[in-house]
Amino acid sequence: MDQSQKASYHAGEAKGQVQEKTSQMMDKAGDTAQSAKESMQETGQQMKAKAQGAADAVKDSVGANK
């Protein structure tokens, strides 16, 4: 292997490593986005339940649920 073949081999090797790292980072970012989305949905459901509870409490106090 002459110098230019070696250089191009190493360049190809480095490119492969960068692509692998990039792909791992994208997977990680995807996982993070997914868990953020799930926790937001959870928070939304909890807030909805609290709002429903508060609305029921108000109805109870004004006698609308009788």
Image (cartoon, rainbow, N blue to C red):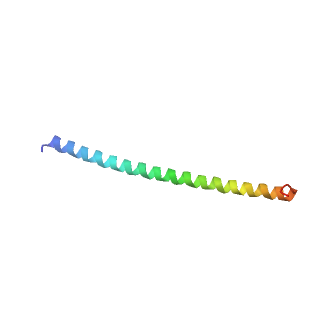
| x then y, percent, for residue 49 | 69, 56
Q: Residue at x 75, y 58 (%)?
A: 53
Q: What residue is rendered at 71% in x and 57% in y?
A: 50
Give the camera-side residue of 63 and 42: 63
Query: Residue at point 17% right, 40% down?
Result: 4
Q: Position of residue 15 (x, y in %)?
A: 29, 45
For this orientation, the residue located farthest to the top is 4
Q: Is residue 55 left or right of residue 24?
A: right
**Residue displayed at 52% across by 54% down:** 35
Q: Position of residue 31 (x, y in %)?
A: 47, 53
Whether residue 62 is situated above or below residue 9 in the rendered picture: below
Image check: 47 left or right of 41? right
**Quadrant where the image shows the C terminus:** bottom right
In the picture, measured across the screen, residue 16 lies left or right of residue 23, that is: left
Of 6 and 46, nearer the camera is 46
Q: In the shown orientation, is residue 28 left or right of residue 58?
A: left
